[in-house]
Amino acid sequence: MGVQLRLFYDQYLSGKPSKGGAEPDAGFGHSGSYDFFAQADLDALVGWRGATMLLHVKGQYDRSVNGEVGALSAPIDDADFDEPIYVDELWLQQTAWSGRLRLRLGFAEQQTIFDRNAYANSEDRQFLTTFLDNNAVVPLPNGLGASLIVAPTSWVEVAIGLADADNEPREVGIDTAFDGWSSLTGYVEAAFEGPWTEQGLPGRYRVGVFVDGRAQPDFRTGSRDRGHVGAWLSFDQRVLASGSGFGELGVFARAGYADPDVGRVTGFWSVVFESTGLLPGRGEDVLGFGVYQTIGSPAYRDAVDPDFRRETGLELYYAVRALGWLVLTPDLQLIVDPDATGAQPDVWVGTLRMRVTF
């Protein structure tokens, strides 16, 4: 009938040892979230050719160790607040030109449109920590917006978008999305197909710029203004195919830069490796390892905190497909200099994630 329904549940059990992070005592926590997707092919339903609508409903609760860790990057990215049900996405997409042009309008997650990648783009399935899921300096709000993606050739794709910069979490944002162009965050990204795709080693190479529509205080002058520019680079590349005898291996890296006069974190980089089917007889298991580092703004150091420098995080996980509908993922993180001020000891965080597909 043209309707696809999907339901997932994720449960996280986490702990940190004593003498690490923001709290000196050992900490244990748990959190959970569900995601329900209803996607409609409007051509099959009502004859609207090339149109698709998506509704993404979500709920979550947070009893995690994020606050006790006290890092810039939340170790459990999906543990933010308590909300039993809310709309995370509701958008309409129109395709044309044999699928080479896609226009999306509505309430959207910008991380599903810009700076996407194959190996570090989902806290539900891949890395847990925020800064391996997203670029630390690129604003990616959830809210009303519009995006246009054009693929003029088979090897290049250009994405252009606008998003409400002032939208509050879980609010529709009608009053903030239409209060002027200056309060919109704009994006332009070009993505290029890797040179080894035809040899069975797909890859994507991206470069993007953004204009941040949030009103932010200038560390040097104290004034608040909008329109600060930043940029990002990223790529994901498969380097070993599944028939190599060592499993399928992919590598991903990203970097970002934001205006140092308004952002505490002005530079960022991360590197990720992901291997699928590394162990004999475990073709669907996934091993992932990633490293990120934030780089503090010199203007922030001069004006606010002279000790604010770098936070570095390492994460290792192994996702075991225990059943067709169940994936269990032991995960270990080390955060060096959490909060980037030197005031908190390095901290280890261990997590067991359970993902159920209904």
Image: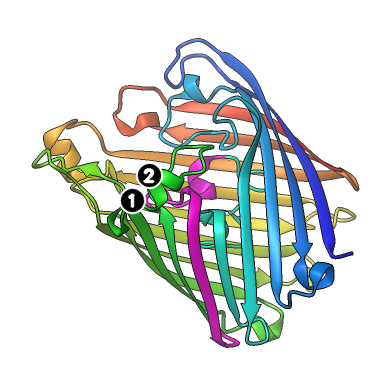
How much space separates mark 2 and mark 1, taking CA atoms? 10 Å
Quarter where residue 269 is shown: bottom left
Q: Is residue 272 above or below residue 168?
A: below
**Apparent side of residue 147 relative to residue 121 in the rendered image (left or right):** left
Q: Residue at x 27, y 38 (%)?
A: 309
Task: Classify the position of the N terminus by image quarter.
Answer: bottom right
- The amino acid marked with disc number 2 is Asp
x and y percentages locating residue 191 in the rendered image: 50, 75
Asked if marks 2 and 1 touch (Cβ < 8 Å), the reply is yes
Which residue is label 1 attached to?
Answer: 179
Does the rendering let one see residue 180?
Answer: yes
Q: Is residue 262 above or below residue 108?
A: above
x and y percentages locating residue 163 in the rendered image: 43, 56
x and y percentages locating residue 143 in the rendered image: 50, 49
Q: Residue at x 49, y 19 (%)?
A: 68
Does the rendering let one see residue 156?
Answer: no
**Apparent side of residue 151 relative to residue 42 in the rendered image (left or right):** left
**Apparent side of residue 202 relative to residue 320 in the rendered image (left or right):** left
Q: Of the numbered discs in the image, which one, if any, rests on residue 46?
A: none
**Apparent side of residue 129 relative to residue 97 in the rendered image (left or right):** left
Which residue is label 2 attached to?
Answer: 166
Task: Name the residue nearer the viewer: 198 or 82.
Answer: 82
> Dot 1: what SS?
loop
Q: In the rendered structure, which disc, 2 or 1, sits on the residue that comes first in sequence?
A: 2
Looking at the image, the residue that sits furthest to the top is: 25
Region rendered in magenta: 129-156
Residue 348 lies within the magenta run: no
x and y percentages locating residue 12 in the rendered image: 69, 29
Q: Nearer the viewer, mark 2 or mark 1?
A: 1
Task: Name the residue nearer the viewer: 356 or 103.
Answer: 103
Callout 1 environment at 10 Å: few (<14), some (14 to 19), or many (20+)?
A: few
Task: Classify the position of the C terminus by image quarter.
Answer: top right
